[in-house]
């Protein structure tokens, strides 16, 4: 129970026009106001007055009936698939038929098209704990095989975001706290190749801290999952504005390029192209700074040693760690003046007139020097041909993006909505008998115990996520398998329905208006969820 119990939640019921009948609910006991009804879709158990929504804004009381305020998102197979000719279902004579369809002509009920339609969990409704079967358990066929898809909106307390930010720049030390609106909502985790990584949300921030921490965490997660921008601050590090699928903005500056590789990789890639144009190249990088003539690539090209001496810790020939501190300057270091990492020159080896290129791993920073008679580098205008290769470094950098993966544990009571014997679902998933999707997007299922799934929010329909004030995240999840396998794992066979029936009668077997639905074209980037090879094999 939370402070939201026995409240009316949000003040207005603005989405009820496109709502779904959920179930008729009456006042539970005499002490309840007779005008209120109780929503039992989550543990908050809101008591909702007529014309109001519950605390999550997802359910409402419409004249004594509990309704789900949002339509179910239905996917139709990508139009570029020539076999896919799909129109939405429209029951003949349905009273609110006009409201239930969209621009496409009505489908006359040909069930063969059921394999071209996918009911997602977005807007599907949920139960917690799962005291009854999932709202949609829908049959279909693919390649002559009978399938069933179990669809629900999961309520996830155990969930987090893994955020990949394509930048070399220093965002914060590993393990540093990440804050949103002053609350700790996650931490910096291990950097990856060309990217800084954050781990955000999670059960400890959602429920293990103060109420405010939980509220800010769930709001931050919902915003990022629904592809909205969020401002974050890292203790001792950067201020960021991040949004899934967009370039991150670090300390007010939009990132443009993801580095081509580390300094050593960059030296290796361009060594041959630089040959004859330069006498030395230093590629400045917070991870590995490369020095061409010492590097294996320079040696293979028989380049003359330059006698340069770099600061930092030498790893292997031509590869240096820790030439400077992490920062937002050259190559993810705090360097403003690249010459500051040069300790000196071996007077026996270097020579006046030596041509030195210094560049970052993205080519955003680059300078050209020539040694004078005292072996001091003097900056000069970069020759055209050298400039072209520096530009090619930039050309080979991919656009800098923010990627948000939603990670959640579906191994709890949610399984009871699928089967009477939950461990059989877990085993079937591990045996690749079940295709797990989130909003139709493929989910990676972690090995080991439980059902821990991970999906890229950019592959899911917009606004797939919601919240409840426990606090927890609401996310769609679908389990698709062969009908025989569903029977074998103790599935709720009495609740298996055709697509037609699901569209006609909505969630569960409610007798009411046709299902309020929103049609979206499946992303061509996603495999069609029905009839994946392991399922049919
Ligand atoms: S917060 Fe929970 S109980 Fe309240 S309306 Fe939303 S789902 Fe129902």
Image: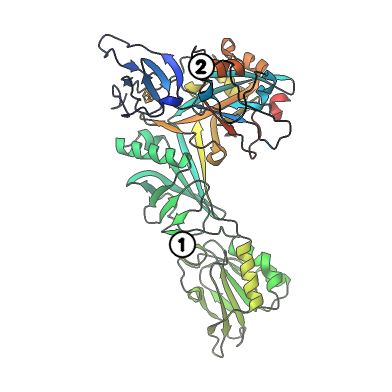
Which corner quadrant of the figure contains ligand 1?
top left
**Residue at point 36% right, 27% down?**
13
Mark 2 surroundings within 10 Å by alpha-carbon count, few (fewer than 14), some (14 through 19), many (20 or more): few
Residue 199 image label: none
- Residue 114: x and y in percent read 66, 22
- The answer to whether residue 341 is left or right of residue 230 is right
Question: Of callouts 2 and 1, which one flags the residue occurring earlier in the amino acid sequence?
Answer: 2
- Residue 126: x and y in percent read 46, 22
Question: Residue 239, can we see it?
Answer: yes
Number of the front mark, 2 or 1: 2
**Residue at point 42% right, 49% down?**
175
**Residue at point 33% right, 29% down?**
12
Q: How is the image coloured?
A: rainbow
Q: Nearer the viewer, residue 315 or 162?
A: 162
Q: Quadrant location of the N terminus?
A: top left
Label 2 to label 1: alpha-carbon separation: 65 Å
- The answer to whether residue 506 is left or right of residue 233 is right
Q: 214 above or below 365?
A: above
Residue 95 image label: 2
Element under disc 2 = loop
Mark 1 surroundings within 10 Å by alpha-carbon count, few (fewer than 14), some (14 through 19), many (20 or more): many
Q: 26 above or below 325?
A: above
- Residue 408: x and y in percent read 49, 33
Element under disc 1 = loop
Q: Quadrant of residue 257?
A: bottom right
Task: Find the residue positioned furthest to the left.
Answer: 31
Residue 326 image label: 1
- Residue 249: x and y in percent read 45, 55
- The answer to whether residue 28 is left or right of residue 164 is left
């Amino acid at each position: 129970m939370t402070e939201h119990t026995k409240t009316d939640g949000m003040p207005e019921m603005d989405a009820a026009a496109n709502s779904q009948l959920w179930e008729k609910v009456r006042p539970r006991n005499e002490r309840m106001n007779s005008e209120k009804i109780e929503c039992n879709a989550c543990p908050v158990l809101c008591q909702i007055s007529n014309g109001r929504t519950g605390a999550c804004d997802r359910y409402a009381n419409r004249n004594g009936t509990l309704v789900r305020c949002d339509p179910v998102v239905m996917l139709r197979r990508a139009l570029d698939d020539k076999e896919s000719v799909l129109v939405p279902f429209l029951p003949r004579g349905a009273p609110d038929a006009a409201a239930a369809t969209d621009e496409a002509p009505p489908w006359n009920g040909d069930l063969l098209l059921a394999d071209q339609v996918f009911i997602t969990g977005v807007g599907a409704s949920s139960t917690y704990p799962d005291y009854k079967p999932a709202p949609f358990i829908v049959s279909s066929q693919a390649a002559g095989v009978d399938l069933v898809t179990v669809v629900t909106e999961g309520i996830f307390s155990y969930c987090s975001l893994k955020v990949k930010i394509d930048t070399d720049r220093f965002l914060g030390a590993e393990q540093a706290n990440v804050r949103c609106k002053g609350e700790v909502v996650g931490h910096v985790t291990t950097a990856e190749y060309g990217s800084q990584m954050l781990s955000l949300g999670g059960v400890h921030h959602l429920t293990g801290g103060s109420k405010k921490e939980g509220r800010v965490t769930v709001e931050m997660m919902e915003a990022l999952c629904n592809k909205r921008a969020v401002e974050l601050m890292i203790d001792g590090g950067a201020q960021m504005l991040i949004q899934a699928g967009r370039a991150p903005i670090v300390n007010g500056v939009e990132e443009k390029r993801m580095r081509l590789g580390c300094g050593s990789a960059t030296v290796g890639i361009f060594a041959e192209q630089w040959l004859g144009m330069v006498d030395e190249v230093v590629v400045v990088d917070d991870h590995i700074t490369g020095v061409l003539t010492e590097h294996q690539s320079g040696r293979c090209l028989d380049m003359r040693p330059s006698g340069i001496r770099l600061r930092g810790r030498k790893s292997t020939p031509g590869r240096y760690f820790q030439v400077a501190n992490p920062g937002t300057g050259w190559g993810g270091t705090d360097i403003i003046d690249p010459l500051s990492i040069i300790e000196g020159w071996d007077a026996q080896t270097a020579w006046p007139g030596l041509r030195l290129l210094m560049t970052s791993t993205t080519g955003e920073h680059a300078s050209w020097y020539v040694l004078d008679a005292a072996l001091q580098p003097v900056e000069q205008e970069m020759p055209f041909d050298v400039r072209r290769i520096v530009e090619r470094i930039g050309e080979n950098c991919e656009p800098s993006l923010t990627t948000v993966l939603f990670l959640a544990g579906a191994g709890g009571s949610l399984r009871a909505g699928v089967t009477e014997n939950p461990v059989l679902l877990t085993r079937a998933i591990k045996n690749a008998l079940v295709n797990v999707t989130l909003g139709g997007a493929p989910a990676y299922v972690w090995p080991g115990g439980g059902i821990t799934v991970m999906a890229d929010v950019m592959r899911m329909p917009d606004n797939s996520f919601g919240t409840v004030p426990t606090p927890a995240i609401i996310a769609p999840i679908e389990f698709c398998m062969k009908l025989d396998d569903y029977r074998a794992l103790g599935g709720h066979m009495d609740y298996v329905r055709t697509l037609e029936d699901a569209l006609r009668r909505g969630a569960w077997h409610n007798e009411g208006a046709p299902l309020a639905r929103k049609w979206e074209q499946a992303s061509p980037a996603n495999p069609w969820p029905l009839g994946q090879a392991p399922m049919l094999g």
